Structures are given as C-alpha cells and as structure tokens.
Image: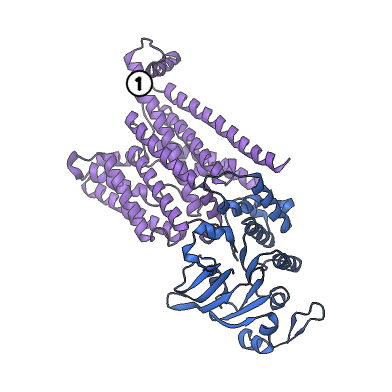
C-alpha cells in the first residue's frame, strides 16, 4: 500500500463513517418524529412532513399534522443540535484543557445558567420582560467571564482554569441554592430541579433555528482550529513551537464553547453526560485527530441525544423522564463497554 | 546569520533565571549549551524559540527581531525538541510526526504527497519507520524522544533547538542522535549534560552558571580542568582523545 492510498484510504474510511452516521441520524430523527404517546400511523407521519415541505397535499387530521410537525419533528431536531453542540464542546475542552474529565459545564456555564434561571423564575428579576432563557444565558456568561478573569484568560494554565471553573460552579450553585431555599416554595424548587436536569418540552421551530445557527457557526470555527487542537496534545509550548498562537486560539475556543453551551443550556437546561462521553466514544472510533474527531462528535452526539429523547418519552407511560436522567442511564453502560474494550485493546 | 541573542534577561518573580546572555549560532554548526542543573539552559532555549518574552535584550533570526516575526513563520524555520513533552492522548507515532507539517499549511490546507515523503524521511532518519503505526503510550522513553526529533525534522527547520535530547536514550541511540544532528546541514543549539559528547560533537560551546555565560568558544578552549572545577565542581583531567582528537575528560574519583 502506498502512502497515497493509505492517506486516501483513511479519508475514505472517515467519509463512509460520516455518511453512515448521517443516515443513522436521519433515521433517528425520523424515529423521534414517528414515536410518541399519541399513536399516529406511519403514513400520516410521513405525509405530515411532506405536506409541510409542499411535496404532497393530503388531507390530514390537523391535530396529527400539528403533533408531528410542530411538536415531534422540531423537538427531535433541537435534540440533534444540542447533542451535536454538547459533544463538540466536550471534545474541544478535553483537548484544550488536556483533561479527560473536561465537559461543557467544566467552566461553570451550567451553574451560572441555573442562577440566572432562578433569578428570573423565583426572584422575578426583569419583571416578566426577560425570558427564562435570556436569564439563563446571562447567568452562564457571567460565570464564564468570572472564570476568564480568575484564570487570566486561561493563560494561567489548564489546571488553574479548571480550578477557576470549579470555583465558579460552587459559587453559582451556592447562589442558586440560596435563592431556592430562602424564597422558593416546594413547587418552585421542584420546577427548578426539573429545569436543571434538562428538558426538550416546549422547544419548537424558533429554538431549532437558533440552535442550528449556533451549532453550525461553532462547528465551523472549531474545524478551522482543528489542526491547532492537534498541536495542543503535547502542551502549550509544543503547540507554540509549531506556530500556533496559543493564547489567542485558547481564548477564542473557550469563548466559542462557552457561548455554544450557554445557548444550549438556556434553551433546554443542563443535559449532562453527552459532552463527557460522546467525545471519548468518538476518539475510540476515529482516533484523536481533530479533523476526524470533531465531525464524528457532531453526528454521534446528535444521534445519541435524539435516541435518549425518544427513550425519555416512552419509557414511562403518561410521563416524560428528564432527559439528563436518560443520558446518564443509557450513557454509563454504553461508556463502560467502550472503556472496557479500550483497556483490552491496550 | 542565524539565531543571535543579545543581553537576554528573564526572571521568574524576583529570581533572575537568564542573566544578560549573549550568544550567536554559526550557520550549519552545532552549539552546545553546558551548565549544571538550574543554570538556565532550558529557559534560554525557550527564549531563543520565542516561547517566552525576555524582560530585556533581544533574540534575532537572520538579523530580524524575533518579536516582529509571526509565530508560524518562526515555526517554519525553528524547531524545538522539549525535554519532557508527553501526552495522555492515544496518538500514533505517525500522527505525532505529522504535527511537524502544521506550520507549512494554512489552517484548512490539505495534506500532500510531499508531506508524506517528509514524514517518511523523518521517521527513517530516527529509525522509527517500522513503528510508525505504534501508539504513543506503548513507546519507551527513548523511542518517544526519537519521535519528537522526527517531528522536529518534519518541520524542515533551518535551526533546531534541543533540550537534553539524549536524556532517555541508551548509549547507541545517544551517539546516533548526536551524529545525526551534527551531520544534517542545519544550525543547532543543544543543551547537553554529557561533557564528552559535547566535546565530540559540538563545534562551539557556551557554558552557563546561574543564568550567566561563564565561558564560550570551541571545546578545546572551553573544557579546561579549571572550568570543570569552578563550574561543575568535579576534579578531572582533560586531554586530546587519541581517537578523534577532541578533548576527552577523565573524571577523578
């Protein structure tokens, strides 16, 4: 095998993998659209979508039409975007901070979002003019700015940046608990807890548009820095000696992941586990090179979260399990298998 | 003209690590940096690579201030081999060597057949061709060091800075590596502990003590009984080797 074939073989392998996983993603979204509490025939589901695209014009029950298009399809697509975004952020942070435990919330974004959310929900900040999502987004950014200042724009090194993130998480979680315990009633506390576990309830097409835009922009920025991220494998000095403007790349990527995570958290709450586990699984499949890793994370994360959302809706009759519970319950066994196999591979 | 340092000073907090160092590398020659532990060799190499900003003094590359040259333009010329560069990531040998091609491409630029040839050549030079598919975590310390050197060679540099590159190597690989670096036509600055190796392979030596240059010149001029006593605190005799004519140091018990 010549080196040329080896190179193109590698790329072709990735292309095939991405093609297959994109088809799987489409199937997952289709399943997410077809499966639900209200039994809707398959052909109705299909025509409800094609009607909206203007490809067919078949008379359908308007309730069915609305459940499929406005509720299930938009929800599945938001889940796909969120899964993609969280997995992407996790992969970037793990590489940038050189820490296998890094995940999208490591820099305190979700803690900040929760403080922002309870400030709106319980304290009534903004007196109704500010939405819950806007409050959560603002809180998440406050927390990130706190971390950025504390770690000198992450120049203080990966270890100290993570510590700053832990400090921010503790601070904002304490603030959230303080607000909930001093002024919340039991029902409000329960609402807050559910919100924190994450939920796709209430997401519709506007959320999908926003999620799609931020994930696509985030993905493109990260891909632009894919090779720079490879260079970080041996530390900052090694990256700098390979011509990477280390400080600038790190600040840009940390800001991008923070904004992306904040946007996702403010929409659907802090869904755990996707951002931690999917990048590791993706590395196991395609290796550590970011040109291959990042697209793989995006599709795998999307598939994972769409499937997790389906499970959360059907596992209990008459009830939707918080998505965060499902991602952990589905994710841990799945991850255990990967961990076990990778140890055996060594 | 190549790398030149003038009056470099660099501190950590109150402590001066590099203290008014001036040196000049000769094109195509090997310059050895000697000095006891903590004498500032590694810090000086980082300053010369442009990875740290000197508190005073300048580093220039072909007469141009290093601070005015873009990072990846520096990386196309100057390669650095660090002492303890490690990763948790499960990269393959070939992937590590491929990192050396990063400065030669725009961020989204494609990989070419020529890049593959450079990478293959670099692997062959350090004798790691047959292990290019092996994982980093499965390599010994010496093999890792050779992969780092292959990565530096893949950068196709004109200047190479090496921080104790022979540290983890067995004697065969130490000699092979030093021969490789002195044979290829690039300018190198190498921090090294083994004084006999320095005498055999380096064209010039600079001796550091507490961040200052205390001696510089050819191995003949620098490696004297007096210097070994004053700087390294060892008793030794120095005489020309009957085999290669370079100074040879016999340590006394």
**Residue A310 x/y as whole percent:** 44, 29
Q: Give the residue at mark 1.
A: A67
In the picture, measured across the screen, residue A308 lies left or right of residue B218, that is left
Image quarter of residue A247: bottom left
* Colour of chain B as rendered: blue
Q: Residue at x 41, y 30 (%)?
A: A77
In the picture, measured across the screen, residue A135 lies left or right of residue A257, that is left
Q: Nearer the viewer, residue B2 or A193?
A: B2
Q: Secondary structure at mark 1?
A: helix
Q: Residue at x 72, y 41 (%)?
A: A2
Q: Nearer the viewer, residue A16 or A312?
A: A16
**Residue A205 x/y as whole percent:** 34, 28
Image quarter of residue B41: bottom right
Relative to B197, residue A207 above or below: above
Image quarter of residue B12: bottom left
Q: Nearer the viewer, residue A148 or B226?
A: B226
Marked residue chain, label 1:
A
In the picture, measured across the screen, residue A2 lies left or right of residue A287, that is right
* Colour of chain A as rendered: purple
Residue density around tag 1, few if under 14, some if 14–19, many if 20 or more, within 10 Å: some
**Residue B60 x/y as whole percent:** 52, 69
């Amino acid at each position: 095998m010549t080196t040329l074939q080896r190179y193109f073989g590698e790329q072709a392998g990735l292309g095939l993998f991405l093609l297959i996983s994109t088809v799987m993603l489409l199937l997952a979204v289709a399943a997410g659209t077809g499966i639900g509490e209200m039994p809707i025939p398959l052909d109705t589901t299909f025509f409800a979508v094609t009607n909206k695209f203007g490809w067919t014009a078949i008379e359908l029950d308007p309730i069915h039409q609305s459940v499929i298009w406005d509720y299930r399809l938009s929800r599945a697509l938001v889940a796909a975007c969120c899964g993609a975004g969280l997995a992407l952020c996790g992969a970037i942070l793990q590489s940038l901070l050189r820490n296998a435990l890094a995940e999208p919330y490591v820099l305190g974004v979700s803690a900040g979002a929760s403080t922002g959310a309870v400030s709106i929900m319980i304290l009534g900040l903004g007196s109704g003019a500010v939405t819950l999502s806007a409050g959560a987004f603002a809180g998440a950014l406050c927390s990130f700015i706190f971390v950025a200042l504390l770690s000198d724009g992450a120049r203080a090194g990966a270890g100290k940046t993570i510590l700053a993130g832990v400090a921010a998480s503790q601070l904002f979680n304490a603030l959230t608990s303080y607000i909930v315990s001093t002024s919340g009633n039991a029902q409000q506390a329960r609402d807050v807890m559910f919100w924190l576990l994450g939920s796709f309830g209430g997401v519709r097409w506007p959320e999908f548009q926003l999620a799609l835009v931020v994930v696509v922009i985030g993905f493109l920025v990260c891909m632009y820095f894919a090779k720079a991220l490879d260079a970080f494998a041996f530390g900052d000095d090694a990256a700098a000696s390979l011509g990477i403007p280390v400080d600038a790349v790190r600040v840009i990527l940390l800001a991008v992941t923070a904004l992306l995570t904040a946007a996702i958290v403010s929409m659907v709450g802090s869904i755990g586990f996707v951002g931690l586990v999917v990048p590791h699984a993706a590395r196991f499949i395609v290796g550590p090179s970011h040109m291959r890793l990042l697209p793989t994370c995006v599709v795998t994360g999307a598939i994972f979260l769409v499937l997790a959302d389906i499970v959360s809706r059907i596992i209990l009759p008459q009830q939707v399990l918080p998505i965060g519970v499902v991602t952990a319950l589905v994710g841990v066994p799945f991850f255990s298998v990967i961990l076990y196999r990778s140890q055996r591979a060594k | 003209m190549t790398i030149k340092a003038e009056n470099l000073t660099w501190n950590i907090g109150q402590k001066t690590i590099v203290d008014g160092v001036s040196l000049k590398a000769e094109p195509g020659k090997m310059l050895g940096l000697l000095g006891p532990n903590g004498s500032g060799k590694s810090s000086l190499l980082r300053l010369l690579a442009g990875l740290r900003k000197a508190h005073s003094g300048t580093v220039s590359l072909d007469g141009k201030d290093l601070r005015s040259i873009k990072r990846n333009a520096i990386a196309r010329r100057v390669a650095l081999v660090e002492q303890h560069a490690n990763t948790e990531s499960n990269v393959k040998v070939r992937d590590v060597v491929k990192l050396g091609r990063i400065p030669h491409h725009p961020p989204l630029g494609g990989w070419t057949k020529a890049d593959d040839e450079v990478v293959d050549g670099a692997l062959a030079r350090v004798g790691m061709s047959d292990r290019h598919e092996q994982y980093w975590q499965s390599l010994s310390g010496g093999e890792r060091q050779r992969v780092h050197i292959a990565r530096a060679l893949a950068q196709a540099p004109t200047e190479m800075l090496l921080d104790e590159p022979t540290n983890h190597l067995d004697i065969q690989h130490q000699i092979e590596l030093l021969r490789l670096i002195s044979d290829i036509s690039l300018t190198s600055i190498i921090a090294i502990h083994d004084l006999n190796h320095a005498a055999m392979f380096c064209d010039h030596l600079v001796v550091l003590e507490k961040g200052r240059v205390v001696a510089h010149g050819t191995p003949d001029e620098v490696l004297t009984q007096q210097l070994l006593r004053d700087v390294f605190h060892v008793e030794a005799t120095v005489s020309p080797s009957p085999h290669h004519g370079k100074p040879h140091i016999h340590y006394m018990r």
